[in-house]
Image: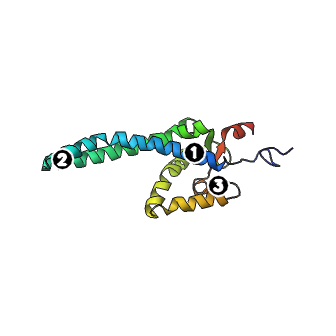
């Protein structure tokens, strides 16, 4: 009977597309919640500014927007990079769905690889006006090994934890 690893028991098999998608949606939801919380002071500053725009209110609005955006960036950096780095390759969404990010050779993913996985999609989606995600979907679905463009660029793989530990 064939093993989940095929002929080579040491081969690394990528996690199913459905798990990757659901863990991404889970992590996106957490980041969206963090964004909303980090921008509450900006919303309050906007409401004060809308009530009576003055120079001081305008400056306060821009300061709170800058600080809120910086806070969101820092917290999302912690969540998308440091949590997987310190927790063995899984963000909360990935841990919940039983997947993790590993290096291409099966070892622990490096900090720079996790950083690329976190922020490269943001940069590419802004540069391509969202077309990046459509291309990434086609690459992931058509890839024989179920690898994405992001996996190739960062030299990582997303694997199912239970299959990875059986290895």
Mark 1 neighbour density, 10 Å: few (under 14) some (14–19) many (20 or more): some
Q: Are marks 1 and 2 in contact (CB under 8 Å)?
A: no
For image coordinates 58% across by 40% down, the residue present is 94
Dot 1: element? helix
Q: Are marks 1 and 3 in contact (CB under 8 Å)?
A: no
Dot 3: element? loop
Q: Quadrant of residue 78?
A: top left
Mark 1–mark 3 distance (CA, rounded to whole Å): 16 Å
Q: Is residue 117 left or right of residue 162?
A: left
Q: Quadrant of residue 138?
A: bottom right
**N-term-proximal mark, 1 vs 2:** 1
State the residue position of label 1: 22
For image coordinates 51% across by 37% down, the residue present is 83
For image coordinates 36% across by 39% down, the residue present is 37
Q: Quadrant of the N terminus?
A: top right
**Residue 148 showing in the rendered view:** yes
* Disc assigned to residue 137: none
Residue 76 position, x and y percent, is 44, 43
Mark 2 neighbour density, 10 Å: few (under 14) some (14–19) many (20 or more): some
Which residue occupies the foreground of this view, 116 or 38? 38
State the residue position of label 2: 49
Residue 124 position, x and y percent, is 48, 60
* Disc assigned to residue 147: 3
Which residue occupies the foreground of this view, 167 or 16? 16
**N-term-proximal mark, 1 vs 3:** 1
Query: Which numbered disc, 3 or 2, marks the residue closer to the eye?
Result: 2
In the rendered view, would you say 130 is above or below 21?
A: below
**N-term-proximal mark, 3 vs 2:** 2
Query: Which numbered disc, 1 or 3, marks the residue closer to the eye?
Result: 1
């Amino acid at each position: 009977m064939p093993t989940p690893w095929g002929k080579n028991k040491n081969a690394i098999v990528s996690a199913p597309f459905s798990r990757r998608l659901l863990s991404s949606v889970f992590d996106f939801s957490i980041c969206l919640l963090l964004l909303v919380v980090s921008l509450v002071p900006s919303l309050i500053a906007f409401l004060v500014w809308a009530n009576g725009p003055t120079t001081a209110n305008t400056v306060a609005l821009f300061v709170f927007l800058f600080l809120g955006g910086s806070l969101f960036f820092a917290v999302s950096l912690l969540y998308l990079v440091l949590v997987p780095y310190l927790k063995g390759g899984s963000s909360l969404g990935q841990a919940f769905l039983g997947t993790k990010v590993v290096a291409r050779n099966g070892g622990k993913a490096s900090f720079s690889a996790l950083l690329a996985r976190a922020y490269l999609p943001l940069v590419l989606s802004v540069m391509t006006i969202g077309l990046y995600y459509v291309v990434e979907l086609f690459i992931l679905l058509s890839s024989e090994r179920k690898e994405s463009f992001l996996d190739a660029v960062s030299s990582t793989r997303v694997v199912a934890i239970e299959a990875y530990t059986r290895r």
